[in-house]
Image (cartoon, helix red, strand yellow):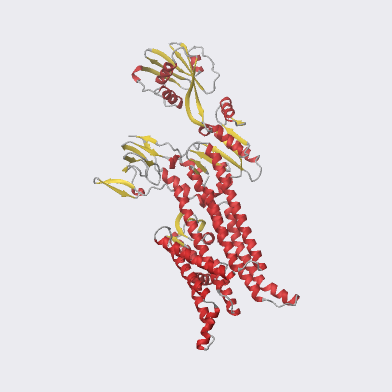
Amino acid sequence: MKKTYKIEVDCANCANKMEEVINKTKGVKNASVNFMTQKLTIYFDDNVDIDSLINDIRDKCQKIDDDCDILI
Amino acid sequence: MLELITKTLLGAIFISSLTFYTLSNKNKFEMTNKQKQVLLRVLASSFIVFLLEFFNADSFNKINDYISYPIGRWIRLVFYLIAYFVIGHDVLKKAFRGLRNKQVFDENFLMALATIGAFSLAIYKNSEYLEAIAVMLFYQIGELFQSYAVGKSRKSISNLMNIRPDYANIEVDGKIEQVSPDEVEKGSLIIVKPGEKVPIDGIVLAGASSLDTKAITGESLPKNIGVNDEITSGSINLTGLLKIKTTKGFEESTVSKILDLVENASSRKSKSEQFISKFASVYTPIVCYLALALAILPPFVRIIFMNLSGEWGTWFYRALTFLVISCPCALVVSIPLSFFAGLGGASKEGILIKGSNFLEALSKTACVVFDKTGTLTQGVFKVKEVHHNNIEQEKLIEYAAIAESASLHPISNSLKEAHGKEIDSSRVEDIKELTGNGITAKIDGKNVAVGNDKLMKLLGIDSILCHSLGTIIHMAIDGVYAGHIVISDIVKSSSKDSIKALRDFGIDKIVMLSGDGKSIADSVSESIGIKETYAELLPQDKVSKVEELLQSMPAKSKLVFVGDGINDAPVLTRADIGIAMGCIGSDAAIEAADVVLLDDDPIKISKAIKISKKCLNIVYQNIFFSIGIKILCLILGALGIASMWTAIFADVGVMILAVLNGIRAMYV
């Protein structure tokens, strides 16, 4: 299941960190953060509750930096 | 002297931030609210510090005399602290939060540690507080500039690729209304005014106009269209009002497909990008441990082995300088930016590259394999010559076209095209198709036979063999041989130059594959300068040929396959980089290809390689330049030559240069 989200992230290194954190999240097959187009693409595992998972992911990203946000 | 410089610098910061702030309020600069806020804080903080620099420590000490209590230096400290909090409170907050979330090696934490350290050192020694604030000030200005420059270039590159239609006009109760394109259903009627983008693919119901299709096909000449013409989304209506019946939904329309391809492009990361993010993740911790070592080891060595004083303060300061330049952000931002600019520049040329990884790989191209039909040749058959005709050439073609009028074969189409006039079907009767051989028919009362030499043999007519290459159509009228027509595919005008351009890049291995006969393939490859040709290949033979070529390639160099995308999807996938031509509308080709050329021009292949080489050059420059300067700063800092804020000055400077250098990749 592939989903694309619009994100807000100010610094390129934070974008890298976001990608790392999201990729380590359970239920995520592969994630890619595109700093330039401010887009996040996630391939979820099958049978996961995407809505709650993406909220978790958003919380995790905001812990990296206040300025990181996923627009859900 | 130094004091004068500091004052001038502070004054300059104050005045320039004031100017920028007023300009941004007058909308001369597009700034986000956040950027404006930072600018305002830079303004306030630099103003306070600027004033404080005129009232030096002595003037505050005079307060002591008035109230006979040594409070002056503390009042001064409070003022400096105010300036410090104004500029740095968010960094401190983020650092604290990072600490709580166990994100220790984070730039905010490092900046907070370095400036608080510098402040404490200054309080302890009762010396100047300026440095801590200056470091924070420069850091914030650097961040501000980075965010502005990156945002700005991101926007200008995105604009290059922006072909997304914002709305579609539909007619509701006689009035024109604007709706979002994805709300329009297939088969609806939409209206496109002059100057507007065509939002959805469709057929013209009413109106005539000329279209600018540059964004979609790369073709710069406007295309004239009228009723019943098909129209692709993304092109711009130049002159007349058009009523269009949509034949697709927005999601399936050409423009959506291209957008999808372009927007996802930089998500496929190149090796350089992966390298730099890996580098960044080890760089910061290493620098932090080095800083720790720098603060502790030298004093210990001095005390224990050299019998000297520890000079803890000096080494602590040097360690802090280390921390200030430990943020890898400047380094990290310039690499994806360069790739993004390269992708943007390519798409401006009508070259859609599916990912930074392919942009990177293109620069290592060592072998280019072409499919002949539709790539080097136009893939359309045209009447080339007429030989041994005993009647007028036009008449012969006319008879052939009439005889073939019922057929839809590409050969018949080319005959009809060469004839160029409406065909009066009442002149023809008794059409017989002899499968694989040709057609016989009665035209204007004459028995006309059109077909290959087998047909002539079948009819007992002696045909004259032809020395030209291509498909030979023999003709006989009333049992008498009337001559033959040569039909062949036409080599694209730019094919020869494209091959030459590739050779100029040092790509010597250029191979042509073709399903056609050897003589045809050889004549094409000879005329455009390809030395290695393989003919009479079935689609699966092409795959094995490419695999064979891949085997013989030196390590790390890449093989490019160029096809028309119609039946060579397996080969496109198998090659290191698959380039498909003019295949918008063919989903399979877009899926299989890594690079899509919007116009069918093969010269764009060398252009793509050129863009790739330039982009990679810039990336390497940025990598070596920024890492080099960082290391230089670290060494100078460790030796005590660079002070904390010269270090940050160098750091910000490198970032700005790297970003500006990266944007260069856009211009080809």
- The answer to whether B607 is drawn above or below residue B376 in the figure is below
Instruction: Name the one closer to the observer, B176 or A54.
Output: B176
- The answer to whether B557 is drawn above or below residue A48 in the figure is above
Instruction: Name the one closer to the observer, B173 or B303.
Output: B303
Image x and y of residue B378, in percent:
49, 31
Residue B659 located left or right of residue B309: left
Residue B441 located left or right of residue B613: left
For this orientation, the residue located farthest to the bottom is: B68
- The answer to whether B243 is drawn above or below residue A28 in the figure is above
Could you tell me which residue is drawn at 54 percent across and 39 percent down?
B605
- Give residue B208's quadrant in the image: top left
Instruction: Name the one closer to the observer, B573 or A40.
Output: A40
- Give residue B428's quadrant in the image: top left
Image x and y of residue B164, in percent:
40, 48
- Is residue B225 something that shows in the picture? yes
From the image, which quarter does the N terminus of chain B lie in? bottom right
Number of labels in the image equals 0
- Give residue B631's quadrant in the image: bottom right
Residue B133 located left or right of residue B446: right
- The answer to whether B427 is drawn above or below residue B507 in the figure is above
Image x and y of residue B356, in percent:
54, 49
Image x and y of residue B414, in percent:
44, 25
- Is residue B188 something that shows in the picture? no
